[in-house]
């Protein structure tokens, strides 16, 4: 069962089918994907990613949450953990790989830190002791700052999909 987490301003909850159109808009925005592959997602790719979120919870017991702004009820992004089975060195397979993405309206408000603080608190209770990681494009200084606020520290620099990345661990 996917939990619902509440913060002062946000509700982290299971995705609803009604989130799909705002999800497509988010992942087709060049500003959102600039440091996440660099290329806007087509509608079909967004659908695959959207339904993958439910599957992650089914198979792994964790996943990403839809982020809803409490004041407006609007979908503003996603945050949580996944197991992407990435072919990178050093391997992060078997860790709780943290990630977050916000639509442009949700950026600049501290929502990523707020949402991930709640998600980390939940994961520490549900999966105490399991290593948490994150991979971030080194040019994405906003996400690097968020990761550091959340207690992640750089452990390696490598490449993924021919793109330089920084591997972070939360200790």
Image (cartoon, grey):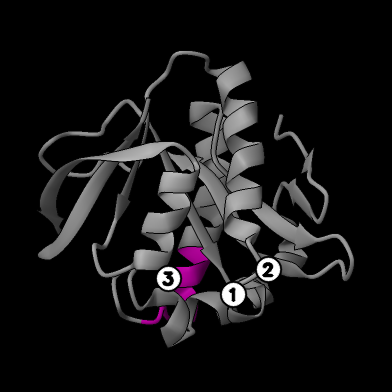
| Residue lying at 59% horizontally and 73% vertically, measured from the top left | 107
Q: Are marks 1 and 2 in contact (CB under 8 Å)?
A: yes
Residue 161 visible within the image? no
The local secondary structure at tag 1 comes to loop
Q: Would you say the magenta stretch is mainly helix, strand or loop?
A: helix
Q: Which residue is mark 1?
A: 103
State the residue in front, 1 or 163. Answer: 163
Which residue is labeled 3 in the image?
A: 45
- Badge 2: residue crowd in 10 Å (few <14, some 14–19, many ≥20): many
Residue placed furthest toward the right: 71
What kind of element bears circle 3? helix
Kind of element beneath mark 2: strand
Say the numbered circle drawn on residue 16: none
Q: Residue at x 57, y 33 (%)?
A: 120
Which x, y percent locates residue 91? 17, 34
Q: Residues within 10 Å of mark 3 (few under 14, many from 20)?
A: few
Q: Which mark is residue 76?
A: 2
Magenta highlight range: 40-48
Q: CA distance from mark 1 to mark 3?
A: 17 Å
Tell me how far mark 2 sits from mark 3, CA to CA.
19 Å
- Please state if 134 lies on the left or on the right of 106 as rendered: left
Q: Is residue 113 magenta?
A: no
- In the image as oriented, which residue stretches furthest toward the top? 129
**Badge 1 density bin: few <14, some 14–19, many ≥20, Cα 10 Å:** many
Residue 84 falls left or right of residue 161: right
How many numbered badges does the structure rendering display? 3
């Amino acid at each position: 069962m996917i939990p619902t987490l509440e913060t002062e301003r946000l509700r982290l909850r299971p995705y609803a089918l009604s989130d799909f159109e705002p999800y497509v808009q988010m992942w087709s925005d060049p500003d959102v994907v600039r440091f996440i592959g660099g290329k806007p997602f087509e509608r079909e790719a967004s659908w695959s990613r959207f339904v993958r979120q439910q599957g992650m919870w089914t198979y792994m017991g964790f996943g990403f949450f839809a982020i809803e702004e409490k004041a407006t009820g609007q979908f503003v992004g996603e945050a949580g953990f996944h197991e992407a089975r990435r072919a990178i060195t050093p391997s992060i397979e078997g860790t709780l790989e943290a990630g977050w993405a916000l639509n442009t309206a949700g950026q600049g408000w501290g929502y990523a830190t707020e949402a991930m603080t709640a998600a980390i608190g939940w994961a520490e209770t549900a999966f105490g002791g399991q290593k948490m990681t994150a991979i971030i494009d080194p040019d994405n200084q906003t996400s690097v700052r968020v990761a550091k606020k959340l207690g992640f520290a750089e452990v390696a620099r490598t490449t993924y999909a021919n793109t330089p990345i920084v591997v972070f661990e939360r200790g």
